[in-house]
Image (cartoon, rainbow, N blue to C red):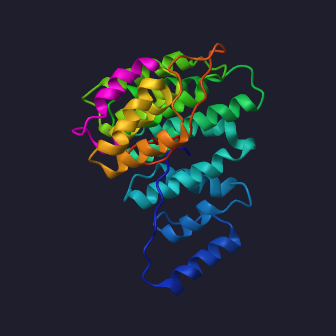
């Protein structure tokens, strides 16, 4: 997914865990117990076969169980959803499961965010399969993405905005203008978490919204959090034109932050500032974003 947490598991008794994982790998079966985390780790990473019958029931029970939910369990659930989404034969059923999990507020915000991150890939898979009309689950998923942008639920807002941006251009009723306007609003909202504002700046930039430049210039000031300032540098680099080049040159020598100076210098050296005006084709090249779950995505165009 576009936004992904990586976890290292500290294990005390290596031989015991190797034995458990070996059994899971050999059988390819879902663990019978929800507390068998080592078994679930191994099963969630298995890619050789589909999830059928009793295994499917165990997986869904594990996904829906909020007991003892922590970062490790959430990461396992994310991997399990990857597996389910990779099975074309079961994909229609996955839409309903994603909705059920996302709407279950007994699950942690982290788990629900992982679920939400699967919304756009699910819709893209449905459209790629040749369906000319979205089913009810798909339409409900798009509605949930729109609602999550305005939910104020921390990381969910940023993930939803990224998801909608990924759907813009597909024939699913989501437009780049819509996501760009959402991004502009969130980026300017001082009540939002800085990481969400940083993500919104990036989406506005990707949509070619040159109107975000005055805000980006303001957010370059040293009193704003570093992730927000880094996204502002990216906006100036991509949309700022010649005036942006001058701003970046000054930042590269005068800014008190080593990170900001480094990013600005890279942008100046690579000459990646572009005109704020869109090309006649009406499209703007969308720079990639580095995924940073804590600080928000930072443009690697710098």
Secondary structure predominantly adopted by residues drawn in magenta: helix
Q: Is residue 217 above or below residue 28?
A: above
Give me the residue at 54% from left, 41% from top. Answer: 270
Q: Is residue 163 above or below residue 211?
A: below
Give me the residue at 33% from left, 27% from top. Answer: 217
Q: Position of residue 294 (x, y in %)?
A: 37, 49
Return the residue found at the far top. Answer: 280
- Residue 35: name its quadrant: bottom left
Relative to the observer, which residue lies in front, 263 or 285? 263
Q: Position of residue 229 (x, y in %)?
A: 33, 38
Q: Position of residue 65 (x, y in %)?
A: 44, 52
Return the residue found at the far left. Answer: 223
Relative to the observer, which residue lies in front, 56 or 195? 195
How many discs appear? 0
Give me the residue at 66% from left, 62% from top. Answer: 46
Q: Is residue 221 magenta?
A: yes
Relative to the observer, which residue lies in front, 51 or 235? 235
Q: In screen coordinates, is 112 left or right of 137?
A: left
Relative to the observer, which residue lies in front, 203 or 108? 203
Numbered range of the magenta stretch:
210-228
Residue 133 appearing in the image: yes
- Residue 74: name its quadrant: bottom left
């Amino acid at each position: 997914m576009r936004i992904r947490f990586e976890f290292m598991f500290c294990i005390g008794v290596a031989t015991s865990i190797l034995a458990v994982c070996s059994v899971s790998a050999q059988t390819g079966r879902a663990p019978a117990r929800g507390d068998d985390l080592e078994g679930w780790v191994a099963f969630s990473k298995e890619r050789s076969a589909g999830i059928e019958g009793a295994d499917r029931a165990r997986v869904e029970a594990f996904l829906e169980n909020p007991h003892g939910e922590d970062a490790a369990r959430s990461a396992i659930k994310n991997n399990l959803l990857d597996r389910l989404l990779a099975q074309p034969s079961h994909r229609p059923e996955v839409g309903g499961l994603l909705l059920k999990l996302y709407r279950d507020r007994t699950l942690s915000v982290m788990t629900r965010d992982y679920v939400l991150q699967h919304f756009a890939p699910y819709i893209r898979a449905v459209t790629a399969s040749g369906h000319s009309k979205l089913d009810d689950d798909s339409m409900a998923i798009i509605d949930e993405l729109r609602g999550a942008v305005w939910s104020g639920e921390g990381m969910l807002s940023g993930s939803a905005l990224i998801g909608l941006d990924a759907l813009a251009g597909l024939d699913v009723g989501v437009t780049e203008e819509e996501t760009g306007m959402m991004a502009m609003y969130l980026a300017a909202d001082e009540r939002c978490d800085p990481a969400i504002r940083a993500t919104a700046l990036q989406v506005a930039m990707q949509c070619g919204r040159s109107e975000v430049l005055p805000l980006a210039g303001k957010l370059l000031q040293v009193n704003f959090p570093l992730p927000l300032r880094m996204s502002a540098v990216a906006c100036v680099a991509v949309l700022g034109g010649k005036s942006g080049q001058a701003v970046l040159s000054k930042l590269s020598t005068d800014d008190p932050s080593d990170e900001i100076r480094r990013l600005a210098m890279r942008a100046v050296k690579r000459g990646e500032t572009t005109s704020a005006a869109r090309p006649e084709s009406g499209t703007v090249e969308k720079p990639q974003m580095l995924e940073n779950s804590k600080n928000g995505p930072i443009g690697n165009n710098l």
